[in-house]
């Protein structure tokens, strides 16, 4: 069996798309509803990073082996989901220029966080199998 599992990576990308769009929607609603949006948005940034970790974890659980590798591949491809979502839903112009200018940063961030989520999936699977 190979190291890369396309089904796991595609499912990770699908989960990431749903979480990313949901997080963007939540951020837009929060900004419009609260009096001080900066204090409310402080907890949304960690939530955005957790979308990568959780999606990498899902990717590892579907792949069933080498979750860190599959999570890292998912993370490298996740920038495409961010770019498509930003172009479809408009997004903030300053974020779009940051995305275009610093795309290496976003790819590296996706690889690290997706790989970390995949590693968590591997660790969970290892300890789950030991306890059985």
Image (cartoon, grey):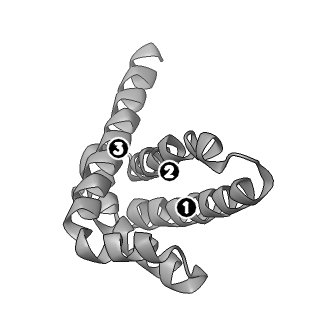
Q: Where's residue 67, x and y in %?
A: 32, 45
Residue 48's disc is 2
**Residue at position x 27%, y 45% in the image:** 68
Say if mark 2 contacts mark 1, CB within 8 Å. Answer: yes
Task: Look at mark 1 in the image and give the residue it sits on.
Answer: 20
Query: Is residue 85 placed above or below 124 in the rendered structure?
Result: below
Residue 53 or 49: which is nearer the viewer? 49
- Secondary structure, mark 2, is helix
**Residue displayed at 41% across by 76% down:** 96
Dot 1: within a 10 Å radius of its alpha carbon, few (fewer than 14), some, or many (20 or more) residues?
many
Quadrant the N terminus occupies: bottom left
The single residue placed furthest to the bottom in the displayed view is 88
Numbered mark located on residue 118 in the image: 3
Question: Which circle's residue, 2 or 1, is located before the other in the chain?
Answer: 1
User: In the figure, is residue 16 to the left or right of 24?
Assistant: left
**Which residue is nearer to you in this view: 30 or 72?**
30
Q: Nearer the viewer, mark 1 or mark 3?
A: 1
Foreground residue among 49 and 116: 49
Say which element carries label 1: helix
**Residue 120 spot, x, y in % from top left:** 37, 34
Q: Picture coordinates of residue 21 (x, y %)?
A: 60, 66
Name the residue at 42% across, 44% down: 53
Q: How many marks?
A: 3
Left or right, residue 89 beside residue 25: left
- Cα–Cα gap, marks 2 and 3: 17 Å
**3D distance between C-alphas at marks 2 and 1:** 7 Å
| Residue 65 visible here | no
Left or right? Give the position of 39 relative to 92.
right
């Amino acid at each position: 069996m190979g190291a890369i599992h396309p089904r796991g990576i595609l499912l990770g990308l699908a989960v990431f798309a749903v979480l990313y769009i949901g997080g963007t929607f939540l951020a837009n609603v929060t900004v419009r509803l609260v009096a001080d949006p900066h204090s409310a948005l402080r907890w949304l940034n960690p939530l955005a990073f957790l979308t990568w970790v959780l999606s990498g974890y899902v990717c590892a659980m579907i792949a069933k082996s080498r979750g860190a590798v599959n999570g890292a591949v998912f993370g490298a491809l996740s920038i495409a989901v961010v770019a498509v979502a930003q172009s479809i839903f408009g997004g903030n112009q300053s974020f779009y220029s940051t995305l275009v200018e610093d795309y290496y940063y976003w790819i590296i961030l996706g690889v690290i966080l997706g790989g970390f989520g995949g590693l968590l999936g591997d660790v969970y699977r290892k300890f789950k199998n030991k306890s059985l």
